[in-house]
Image: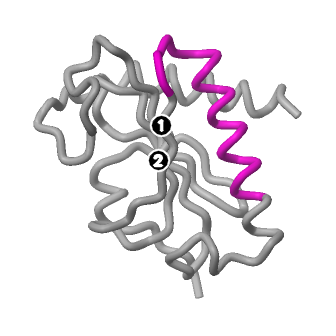
Amino acid sequence: MTFQLADRLQQDSFILVEDPHSFWLLLNNQNFPWFILVPKTDKQELFELSAQAQKRLQAKTNQLSRFITEQFPFDKLNIASIGNIVRQLHIHVIARSASDPCWPGVVWGTKHVTKYKQDDVEAIKEALQYFLSTSD
């Protein structure tokens, strides 16, 4: 069985990286540096993953968090696994700032959407790929 990324994630995000175990996505809203990690699994809940898969996903979440910290100014990093609309297991890693249009409220379902320009997505993608190639 081939892993299929959920339609909603495909529609709302850009694929920045695909590795053997996951997809690294960027949500198409430049108001927030909003990234999504999707492990390649049929499980819907974190606790259903094997201990090894949980460790791998946590390590990737930490890696993505470090990348965001180096690339974007923010006041608080939000990390969550919600999945009420998209049931496919995924982790949101969102850099929030007191100046963002939803602060201090939630960003879920916001009407404050500013789509990325393709050049900006490519720059973030290149920066992430470089970061991953040089980090341990």
Magenta-tinted stretch? 56-76
Residue 89 in magenta stretch: no
Q: Residue furthest left?
A: 111
Q: Residue furthest right?
A: 136
The quadrant where residue 67 appears: top right
Name the residue: 45% across, 67% down.
5
* Left or right relative to 113: residue 15: right
Report x, y in % for residue 73. Answer: 49, 11
Dot 2: what SS? strand
Residue 60 in magenta stretch: yes
Badges 1 and 2: C-beta atoms under 8 Å apart?
yes
Amino acid type of disc 2? Answer: His
Give the residue number, with chain letter if any, for mark 2: 92
Name the residue: 57% across, 55% down.
23
Amino acid type of disc 1? Answer: Asn
Which dot marks residue 78? 1
Residue neighbourhood size for the residue with mark 2, other residues' Cα within 10 Å, grouped as few (<14), some (14–19), many (≥20): many
Dot 1: what SS? strand
Q: Residue furthest bottom?
A: 1
- State how far apart marks 1 and 2 are (Cα): 8 Å
* Left or right relative to 13: residue 136: right
Report x, y in % for residue 58. Answer: 71, 52
Name the residue: 28% across, 32% down.
29
The quadrant where residue 11 appears: bottom left
* Left or right relative to 74: residue 1: right
